[in-house]
Amino acid sequence: MRVVHDDTGTGKDGQRPPRNALAEAYRVLDLGLRMTLSVAAFAAGGFWLDRKLGLGFPVGTLVGFALGFVAGFWALIRGLDRPRSSKGKGDATSEDGSGR
């Protein structure tokens, strides 16, 4: 079976995927990375603190994991709340422009 590579970025049918689909895929990837990196960073900080203090039980790691989960979930909620495109920036604001 011979595989042909196409440098134009088009699919089998010669059409590119819709730009909105790619933008949505990047948005979902961004949200997932925010959650993952928040948990990993806080857990790593807690692990470092455990090592620094010489604790036998991983209290810092568990607290760091919990804080990372909360921070990641907060970032996830904020990311879902923002408008999907720059066209809709004015749609989310009220008549006085306050956004409430």
Image: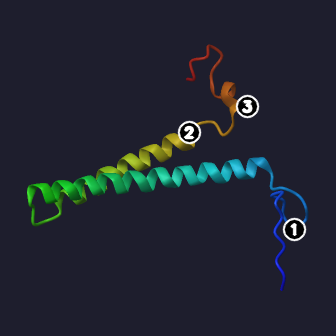
Please identify the residue farthest to the top as the structure is shown: 96
Hey, what amino acid is under mark 3? Lys
Residue 50: % across, % down: 15, 58
Residue 49: % across, % down: 17, 53
**Residue that numbered label 2 is attached to:** 81
Of the two numbered discs 3 and 1 on the same chain, state the one appearing first in sequence. 1
**Residue that numbered label 3 is attached to:** 87
Q: Quadrant of the N terminus?
A: bottom right
Residue 42: % across, % down: 31, 52
Secondary element at image label 3: helix
Cα distance between the residues tagged 2 and 1: 35 Å
Hey, what amino acid is under mark 2? Asp
Are there few (<14), some (14-19), or many (20+) residues within 10 Å of tag 3?
A: few
Hey, what amino acid is under mark 1? Lys
Cα distance between the residues tagged 3 and 1: 31 Å
Where 83 sits versus 64, above or below?
above
Q: Quadrant of the C terminus?
A: top right
Residue at (58% x, 37% y) in the render: 82
In the shown orientation, is residue 56 left or right of residue 10?
Answer: left
Residue 57: % across, % down: 13, 65
Mark 3 or mark 2, whichever is nearer to me: 3
Secondary element at image label 2: helix
In the shown orientation, is residue 18 left or right of residue 51?
Answer: right
